[in-house]
Amino acid sequence: MPVEIDRVDSDTVLPRHADVVVVGGGIIGVCTALFLAERGIKTVLCEKGVIAGEQSSRNWGWCRTMGRDPRELPLMLESLRLWRGMNERVGADTGFRQTGTLYICPDAAAFAKREAWLPFAKAHGVDSRLLRGAEVNHLLEGSAQDWMGALHTPGDGVAEPGLAAPAIARAARKHGASILTNCAVRGLEYSGGRVSGVVTEKGSIGCDRVVLAGGAWSSLFCGSFGLRLPQLKVLASVLRTAPVANGPSTAAWGPGLSLRKRLDGGYTVSNGRVVADVVPDSFRFLREFLPVLRMEWSGISLNIGRPFFDEWHRTRPWRLDDVSPFERVRTLDPSPVAKDIRSARANLERAFPAFKNIAVAASWGGMIDATPDLIPVISEVDAIPGLVISTGYSGHGFGIGPGAGRLTADLASQNRPVVDPTPFRFSRFSDGTSIRPQAGL
């Protein structure tokens, strides 16, 4: 894999029973496991590949309240609080630091869009403010372009994706959780009308509750037991530069460009576009996804090809005593889109001359799990007692991971939720709720 991830060794003994089994070792799964284990709840985390092998190590590394859907803001504020104390909590470096975040506004329409979001920030105590003209260039060291304005949030931060989830997983183990890698969960077991365990490739684990934090695999897993979860995945392409001496320290997003300074002095860079493969689920969930497709059309490219047939084969039923799709593909490791990498590099050099002739150290692709309204599902499932779903973070999952993990742990342990989970309920897809992103974001 082109991404750098701290290794987490697997436990070697498969427990016979646990209070909670967490399916998935990304940022959501490991945070959930940590908060459960801290409470003395016997927890087993099963990851089909390696910890943070997919999008949790491939994202931009932003930890932002800025521009969030208002429904996510309380949870993100809790996440930032947790990020600020995470290194001390886990006894390791997650790379978190408060750098601020910046949305560049190239024109009046973009400025008005960001200005319209400010009342939500004020209502939640977020320290966002609008900058104009020279204020933007003063904040963006080395910028060669003049910008109309920007939305700036000094209290936001960044962390290192390759460090964070592994550090949190090791901390969960210190508190008693079992961390099993290369251990795919094939399906659920039931007793008395509720979940009573999971079947893994290495054997069964009895449990009282299961947390599904499977990222881009969650909809396929749900479909295996007849649960319809409207979720698709999109491909984002990212590059990493060699160290640069005079680049900006604030994480910034603008037209065709996002960048974040890394601990090693290089930058994580993207042009912000995604590619959506046309697959069978594209038609299955078309009605739910039409509103977001219309809103985000300029930033999405469609691809028709081999992924359609790959996905078609993956959806074929499998037996719990046979190899599952989760074992056939341990890690989604797609190639980045070459034209998007070239575009990001060209836009970077145009905006910041210091990056000219700086080597691209690596580039990669990552599959983002998206819901039709671009907010996650963090919810119990009425039809399947004992199952909690935490997925569909739509490219926002890394930064919100600690708060989401705490909320997921609250639901799995039947504690009082840290924030109101109502906006994230699974039943919103069937109870007549209007399923669409927040207008203007």
Image: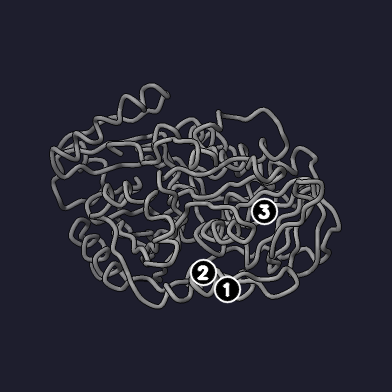
Residue 264 disc label: none
* Image x and y of residue 33, in percent: 69, 48
Query: From the viewer's perspective, is residue 70 above or below residue 435?
Result: above
What residue occupies the far right of the structure in this picture?
16
**Res. 329 mark:** 1
Callout 2: SS = loop
The label on residue 169 is: 3
In the rendered image, residue 385, in percent from the top left (x then y), is placed at: 71, 43
Residue at 42%, 69% in the rendered image:
364
The residue type indicated by label 2 comes to Leu
SS under mark 3: helix
Q: Marks 1 and 2: in contact by CB < 8 Å?
A: yes
Residue 281, percent across and down? 45, 62
Q: How is the image coloured?
A: one colour
Q: What element carries label 1?
A: loop
Residue at the location (20% across, 60% down)? 353
Left or right of 199? Residue 254 is left
The crowd level at tag 2 (other Cα within 10 Å; few <14, some 14-19, many 20+) is some
Kind of residue at disc 3? Ala
What residue is pinned by disc 2? 332
Q: Can you say whether 9 is above or below 82 in the image?
A: below
Q: State whether residue 111 is above or below residue 328.
A: above
Residue contact at pointers 1 and 3, CB within 8 angstroms: no
Residue 23's spot in the image, x, y percent? 66, 56
**Amino acid type, mark 1:** Val
Residue at left offset 54%, top offset 33%: 78
Give whichever of discs 1 and 3 has the lower sequence position: 3
Disc 1 vs disc 3: which is toward the camera? Answer: 1
Tell me which corner region of the image, top left, top right, bottom left or bottom right, holds residue 415: top right
Given this view, does label 2 or label 3 mark the residue nearer the observer? 2
User: The C terminus is located in which quarter?
Assistant: top left
